[in-house]
Image: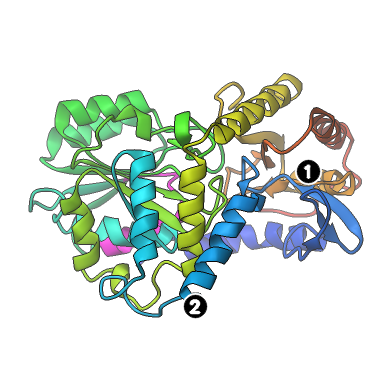
Amino acid sequence: MGKFANMEKVIALGEKSWRAGAEHGLVQVRTTKGDNGQLILDGHAFTNMVSCSYLGLNRHPAILRGAIDAIEREGVLNHSVSRTRIAPALLSEAEDAMSQLFECEAYLTPSCFVASATVLPLYASGHLTEGKKPVVVFDKRCHFSMTIMKASCGDETEVVTIDHNDMVALEELCKNHEKVVYVCDGAYSTGGVAPIHDIVRLQNTYGLYLYIDDSHSISAYAPRGHGYMRPAFGALGDRTIISGSLAKSFGAIGGVILAGSARIRELFDFANGPTGWSQQFSVPGMGSALATAKLHLTSEVADLQGRLQENIAYFDSRLASKDAGNGLPIRFVEVGEAEAAIEASQRILARGFYVSAIFFPIVPRGKAGLRMMMRADMSREQMKEFCDAIEEAITRPMAHEPALTA
C-alpha cells in the first residue's frame, strides 16, 4: 500500500492551509465576466494573474470563431463514440494543421491526463521500446497528470522516482538497464525547466526514451510556439514523445501528443486505451485547435511572444525570483510560511490582482510563496501596478500571528 501514491498524507498535511485559503477568499472563487479581460467577484474587478493563457489567446476572436464554426458545421458538441471508430473529418483537419505546425505527428486528446494515460502504459508494456519492458523513471516534481499513472505503469514494469532534475541518478539507471524511459515536465508548473542538454546527451549516449509534458511553454515560447523542448530534437524519432495542453497558452481546448512516426501514432488508436472511450476530442475543441494552429503560423503570435517577453523582463527587473531571466512566463516569489503567503495573496487581490498562495505539500515547509503567470495582454502601466501590489504585500508585516501548522 502507498507504493505509488501518498494522497492520505497530502490531504492530512495540506488541508489546513487550503481551508485557510478558503477563509481568506482565495480558493473556490466564483466570478462573472468583466471588461478588458478582468473578472468580477462580488462587484470587485481584478486581473487573473494565474491564468495560463500567457498570450491572451483564450479570448482571441479567430479561435472563438473556430469553435463556433465547428459546432455549427457538425451540429453537436461531441459525437459520443470512440475516435477509433468514428470521428468527423474536422478532427483530421485539426490534427493535420497541428502536425504541420510542430513538424511531426500530432494526435489530439481531451486533456493532458488522457495523453499521459494513452502513452505511459504503452511505454511500460514495452510496446514503444522494441518489445522489451523498460524501467520507467519519474522526476519527483512531475505534474500530477503524469504521476497518477505510476500505479498503472508499476503493474507492468519497474517504476522509479528520482529527485528533481537529478541527471546523475538518471544516468546511473541508463548505465544499468537496457531500456529506460524518463518522464518529466519541460517547463514546470511551479517554475524552472528540465535540463534539456543533459537529457539529449543521455538519449544520444544510451538510447533513453522520453515522455515530456511541455504544457507551460508551448505556444508561449520559441518560433511558431514550439515550446522549450520540441526545438531540441529536430526530427522526434521513435524515442521522444512530447505532450502539451492546448487549453493554456494556445487558447483552445484539450491536449496534444507529438510523436515521431505514424507507427507510434497508430498505436494510440489501436491499443484500447482512452482513445477507445466514447468521449473523444470535442467538436469545439477541433475547431479551436484548427484555428489556433493556423494562427501560430502567422506573425501575430511572434508579436505576442515579444510583448510577453517584455512583461517578463519588466517583472524580473522589479522582483527577485529563482527563475528570473529564463524567458518562461511562470514566476514564484518565496515569502516563507503558508500564513504569510495567504495573507499576501489576499492583499494583492484587494489591489486588483489574483495570485496563487503556494504552500506545502506543493513546495517544502517554510518555502511558501506566491505563484503568478506573466501575460502578453497587459500594458506597462498594469505591470507596474501589479509589481507595486506585490512589493507592498510582501513587505508589510502580517496582521496577526501565524495560527496554522502544516
Q: Is any part of residue 142 visible from this angle? A: yes
The outermost residue toward the left is 131
Task: Tell me: residue 356, above or below residue 103.
Answer: below
Q: Is residue 328 highlighted in magenta?
A: no
**Residue type at numbered disc 2:** Val
Q: Is mark 2 on a helix, strand or loop?
A: loop
Give coordinates of residue 45: x percent, y percent. Answer: 87, 53
Q: In the drawing, what numbered circle is on residue 384? A: none
Q: Earlier in the sequence, mark 1 or mark 2?
A: 2
In space, the residues marked 1 and 2 are separated at their CA atoms by 48 Å
Q: State the quadrant of the N terminus.
A: bottom left
Which residue occupies 56% across, 45% down?
A: 249
State left or right for residue 362 relative to residue 262: right
Which residue occupies 66% across, 28% down?
A: 307
- The residue beneath circle 1 is 340
- The residue beneath circle 2 is 76
Q: Hey, which quadrant is residue 373 in on the image?
A: top right
State left or right for residue 370 relative to residue 403: left
Give coordinates of residue 386: x percent, y percent. Answer: 81, 35
Give coordinates of residue 256: x percent, y percent. Answer: 39, 53
| Residue stretch rendered in magenta on the structure | 138-153
**Residues at discs 1 and 2 in contact (Cβ within 8 Å):** no
Q: Which of 24 and 48 is in front in this view?
A: 48
Which residue occupies 36% across, 28% down?
A: 196
